[in-house]
Image (tube, rainbow, N blue to C red):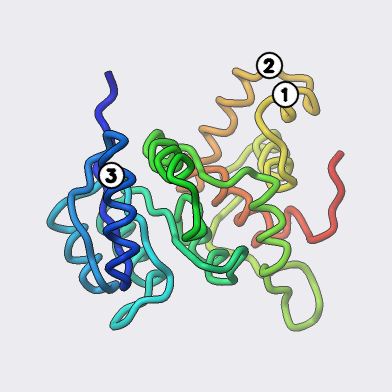
Amino acid sequence: MTAAPRVLIADDQALIRSGFRLILTTRGIDVVGEAADGAQAVAAARELRPDVVLMDIRMPNMDGLEAARRILAQSPRCRVIMLTTFDLDRYIYAALALGASGFLLKDVTPEHLAAAVRLVDTGDALLAPSITRRLVERFAAPDRNGGPPRTGPADLAGLTPREVEVLTLMGRGLSNAELAGALSLSETTVKTHVARIFAKLGLRDRAQAVVVAYETGLVRAGDRLP
């Protein structure tokens, strides 16, 4: 039986923290700690080594975005879910780019909260690729000359032509099954290509892959599915 994920809750509202703790613990998920601001979250993550951090975006002393960046740098295997009161908050885009595994609205249902924690603990992204695509289209910044999105840190030179094709289609929101159909490949072969892309580019999940596809100009806002 797979061990339950160990969770750290970071939110400046005590009521949110206690509510989420109750929801998760009654569903067999271990809450190992709480933090009231970003600085506390970074320190707690370093000490407690949680599997998943529920991270509020807006907190005093250090915001959730900076806290997430530091936690992911010090604990690459940790998964971070950003918490927000606003759907498609522009900070979520930056969080996905730095490696957060998705986001939840604070009015999430108890069942969805527990399911989301278990999902990201397995290594999957919380966001469906199509949702991530809409988010990135909204906030990916074009360059000053009105050209394609700015090139991100990812170096695509190490990818094979097929891997570039797979990454492009992931950026357009295709699932593995849809990729297999579009490229006339088996789903197992597609999964192998996806895993190699993640390894070569240092990506954590599909949400981050969509961001990279836009940031490097492989996909532009308004591109249609094949």
Q: Quadrant of residue 145?
A: bottom right
Q: Quadrant of the rendered structure where residue 63 is? A: bottom left
Residue at 45%, 39% (x, y): give it.
111
The residue that mark 3 highlights is 51
| Residue that numbered label 1 is attached to | 180
Task: For marks 1 and 3, give the one nearer the viewer.
Answer: 3
Secondary structure state at the residue bearing disc 3: loop
What whole-number distance in Å separates the C-alpha atoms at marks 1 and 2? 6 Å
- Residue drawn at point x = 67 percent, y = 50 percent: 131
- CA separation in Å, label 1 and label 3: 31 Å
Residue 172 rendering spot, x and y as whole percentages: 74, 46
Query: In front: mark 2 or mark 3?
Result: 3
Q: Residue furthest left?
A: 47
Q: Is disc 1 placed on a helix, strand or loop?
A: helix
Which tag, 1 or 3, sits closer to the chain's start? 3
The answer to whether 72 is drawn above or below residue 119 in the figure is below
